[in-house]
Structure formats: structure tokens, C-alpha cells
């Protein structure tokens, strides 16, 4: 194999490049990214970066790393087609040949079909460019309305409050972060944000963003109420970038479909990260995960596969979100859980919710309780399911389960 191309310079693409070299690939290796920055950590964009005027992007690896490892960075270039028969990709400004390909195209913000979404001071956040724009706006903003009570919306809401803005969060669902966390966690964060002085409106779908002279001045709810805003942040999820794969005739669903070793329907092409849909061994169905851990671990698997050392991907998923003074950490997938038990006390600001399906522990959501989270990663990896009664008894040392 002479040339491997990686499409996408996010967490998955950068990890694939590093892993391919570490796994012994010594041919030409190029990473193509539409973004102009060296691959950087995306999570800080909604955390430290946006709140601190002189905060720099945190590079995943320094420029020297790519240089030393012979990884060509093709930044600011976009792949517009994968010509599988010819073994090359078409870029907006030329062609590059490949023997194997890593698809790490990630996801983009979902733009809801709301009138006024195109107005000038409406913000969505995915890239460094978006974050710089929002950070500049935060210097001027006074009345911020956040549409969407998910992780990114809530992180930005907490930051905006910290910066002294008037903040309203409007969420269509009956609870915050409802797709992914336990109701106890949603209600803890609802109280927390309200405690910071944020107005949080649940079951309040947005109908329109109202503009005057091309500038947003209010958000109108479906019930017809207008909430004044000089800055509107919309955070209603992402859509996977699957168009390239689909147009090249690869199998796609809610993501580029891969097998357990991250191979797409063309064995020369592997895929990893937010763009990927894979069959989850524990849930028994296809999932697409949006997290740094998943992007990094899938990229490692994808690299091993291309190097002829395929192994099934079965990493325990984990994720985190920082909101105000609280760190929320999740491990496992709670979607199919049928009961839960709480360890610690929400009123003390430090607790975990352990999720079970039948007798099996499937996930843990922790608030300011890193030790439960770290232990949970080990319990889930080892397939250990502590008795729920034991879990709720704080006197019992959970660590002893893996001693
Ligand atoms: P991406 O990071 O989306 O990278 C894909 C790259 O591919 C992009 O650079 C894109 O420009 C490029 N690309 C796409 N198509 C093409 C093309 N045709 N040609 C060339 N280049 C292309 N996760 C956590 O685990 N914890 C967090 O706290 C957390 N916070 C987050 C905060 C924010 C603001 C955001 C936006 C995300 C956050 N995430 C967090 C999610 C995490 O960042 C993603 O799961 C992760 O970035 C996925 O990596 P990826 O490489 O699959 O995709």
C-alpha cells in the first residue's frame, strides 16, 4: 500500500494519522481538512475558549509532530468526490490518488428550518471559526437566548451567565439533555442553571427568530410569546457528513455504515468518528456516537484494520460536559436502561446515577464525582454489575469490586 488519505482533520482524522504511523505504515500519508487550522480539541470551544478572549486553540498535536512523522497536512482543502474506480479523490482544487482511505468527515450543526435562522447575530457552534465569531459577539451581547437545552447550549448558557448576560434557554422537550441523561441529572442541571439566574423554559418549541434590519431582536415561541434577544445561539444537534460516502456508493444510514472493524462497504475504505454508524455489541442495534472517546478509539481500530490487524471495536463509550461549576461525566449508554439507582445526594452537588437493564449495569451518569466515573469505566469494561442495593449504600466501597 503506497498512499493512505484521511478525509477530515478532527479528532478521528488526527488520531488515524498518528495511529497509522505508530502501527507501521510507511507510505505516503495525507490528512485533508476543510478547516484551515491544525487539528485541535473541539470540546474547549464551548468551554474555556469562548469565555476567555486570549485563549488559544488547543492543538491535538503540535505541527512538528506531523512534520516528523511525514504526515502531509492538506488544510483548507475539501474533498468533493471519492472516485473509487480510479482510486482517487477529487478536491475543490485538484485530485489525490489513494490505495486506502479513512473517512473521518465528522458532523456539522443541524440548522433547524426556523424563519430568521439566517439573521446576522444568530450563532451555531461547531468549528474554531464559529467559536471566534461567538466569542467576539459575547463581548457585546446583553440578552442571550439559547435555543436547545443540550450539552452545547447549556455549556454556552452557563458561560454567558458567568459573563453577566441575561440568559434564556428554550427547550422543546420536557427536560434538559433528555436524549442522553437520567431524569435526576436533568432536574439537577435545571435547578443549577436557574440558580445561576438563567431563565429555562421547557416544552417551549421555537417558532421563529424575529429580525429588524437583518438583525435578530427576539425569539418567538410556538405559543406566540416573544423573548427579546440581541444574540441567539442555536444548539439543536448535528447531522453526520455522509454525503461523500453516499455519492460514492458506500452504504449509509444515520452515518457511514461500518462493520465491527470500521470497514465501510468498500474494504479499502475505513471510517471513524461522528460520521459513523456501527452495530453496537451491547445494544444489539446500529448507533452513531458523538464523542471524542468514540472518534479516537474508532480511529485506532480503523488504522489497525488497514494495517491488517483488524480487531472488533468494543470500547466502553464515555463523554463529559462542563456546565458552571459542575462536571457531568457519562459512561456507557443508558438508552435502553429500565431502572436506575442513585449514589450520593444531588443536594450535596455530587452524585451518580447507575443505570441497569435487568441485572446488568449499562451506564453511569456522574456529577462532580470523577471517582465513580473512572470506576464505572472499569466495571463496564470488565462486565461487572454491582448489586443496586450495594451501589446506593455510600458506606460500601465500590472499589472493592475490582480489587
Ligand atoms: P469532527 O471533529 O467533526 O471533524 C471532522 C472534520 O472533517 C472537520 O474538520 C471537517 O471540516 C472535515 N471534513 C468534513 N468533510 C470534509 C471534506 N469533504 N473534505 C475535507 N474535510 C472534511 N465531545 C466530548 O466527548 N466531550 C465534550 O465535552 C464535547 N464538547 C464539544 C463541544 C463542542 C463545541 C463541539 C462542537 C463538540 C463537542 N464534543 C464533545 C463532540 C466532539 O468534539 C466530537 O464528537 C468529535 O469532534 C468528533 O470527531 P470527528 O473527527 O469524528 O469529527
Image (cartoon, grey):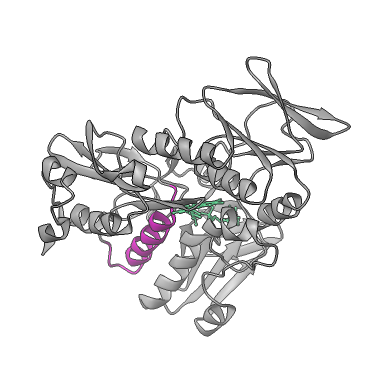
Judge by depth and name the residue closer to the eye, 346 or 118. 346
Q: Is residue 392 above or below residue 200?
A: below
Most distant residue in the top direction? 223
Q: Can residue 24 be found in the magenta stretch?
A: no
At x 33%, y 61%, the residue is 301
Q: Main secondary structure of the magenta part?
A: helix
Query: Residue at the location (43% across, 80% down)?
Result: 26
Whether 148 is drawn above or below 4: the answer is above
Can see residue 181?
no
Q: Residue furthest right?
A: 213
Left or right for 278, reference 255: left
Whether 267 is drawn above or below 209: the answer is below
Horizontal and vertical percent for residue 263?
Answer: 36, 53
Residues drawn in magenta? 290-310
Camera-side residue of 182 and 277: 182
| Residue at image coords 35%, 53% | 318
Q: Is residue 307 visible?
A: yes
The percent coordinates of residue 316 (x first, y second) are 28, 53
Query: Nearest the camera: 13 or 93?
Result: 13
Q: Position of residue 158 (x, y in %)?
A: 57, 46
Q: Is residue 382 left or right of residue 319?
A: left
Amino acid at each position: 500500500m503506497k498512499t493512505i488519505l484521511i478525509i477530515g482533520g478532527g479528532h478521528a482524522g488526527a488520531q488515524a494519522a498518528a495511529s497509522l504511523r505508530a502501527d507501521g505504515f510507511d507510505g505516503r500519508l495525507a490528512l485533508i481538512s476543510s478547516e484551515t487550522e491544525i487539528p485541535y480539541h473541539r470540546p474547549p470551544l464551548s468551554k474555556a475558549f469562548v469565555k476567555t478572549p486570549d485563549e488559544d486553540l488547543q492543538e491535538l498535536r503540535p505541527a512538528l509532530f506531523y512534520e516528523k512523522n511525514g504526515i502531509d497536512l492538506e488544510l483548507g482543502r475539501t474533498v468533493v468526490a471519492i472516485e473509487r474506480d480510479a482510486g482517487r479523490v477529487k478536491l475543490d482544487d485538484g485530485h489525490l490518488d489513494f490505495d486506502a482511505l479513512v473517512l473521518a468527515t465528522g458532523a456539522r450543526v443541524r440548522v433547524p428550518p426556523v424563519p430568521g435562522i439566517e439573521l446576522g447575530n444568530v450563532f451555531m457552534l461547531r468549528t474554531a471559526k464559529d467559536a471566534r465569531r461567538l466569542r467576539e459577539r459575547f463581548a457585546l451581547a446583553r440578552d442571550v437566548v439559547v435555543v436547545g437545552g443540550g450539552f452545547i447550549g447549556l455549556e454556552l448558557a452557563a458561560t454567558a451567565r458567568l459573563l453577566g448576560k441575561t440568559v434564556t434557554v428554550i427547550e422543546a422537550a420536557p427536560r434538559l439533555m433528555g436524549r442522553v441523561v437520567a431524569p435526576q441529572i436533568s432536574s439537577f442541571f435545571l435547578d443549577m442553571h436557574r440558580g445561576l439566574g438563567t431563565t429555562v423554559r421547557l416544552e417551549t418549541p421555537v417558532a421563529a427568530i424575529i429580525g429588524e434590519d437583518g438583525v435578530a431582536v427576539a425569539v418567538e415561541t410556538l405559543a406566540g410569546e416573544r423573548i427579546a434577544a440581541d444574540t441567539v445561539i442555536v444548539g439543536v444537534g448535528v447531522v453526520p457528513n455522509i454525503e461523500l460516502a453516499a455519492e460514492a456508493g458506500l452504504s449509509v444510514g444515520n452515518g457511514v455504515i461500518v462493520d465491527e472493524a470500521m470497514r465501510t462497504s468498500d474494504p479499502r475504505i475505513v471510517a471513524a468518528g461522528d460520521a459513523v454508524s456501527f452495530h453496537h455489541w451491547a445494544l444489539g442495534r446500529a448507533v452513531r456516537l458523538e464523542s471524542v472517546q468514540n472518534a479516537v478509539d474508532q480511529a485506532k481500530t480503523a488504522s489497525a484494520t488497514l494495517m491488517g490487524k483488524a480487531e472488533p471495536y468494543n470500547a466502553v463509550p464515555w463523554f463529559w460536559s462542563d456546565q458552571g461549576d459542575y462536571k457531568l461525566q457519562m459512561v456507557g449508554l443508558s438508552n435502553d436502561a429500565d431502572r436506575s439507582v442513585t449514589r450520593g445526594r444531588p443536594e450535596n452537588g455530587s452524585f451518580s446515577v447507575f443505570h441497569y437493564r435487568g441485572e446488568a449495569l449499562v451506564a453511569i451518569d456522574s456529577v462532580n464525582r470523577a471517582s465513580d466515573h473512572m470506576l464505572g469505566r472499569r466495571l463496564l469494561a470488565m462486565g461487572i454489575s454491582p448489586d443496586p442495593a450495594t451501589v446506593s449504600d455510600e458506606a460500601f466501597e465500590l472499589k472493592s469490586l475490582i480489587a
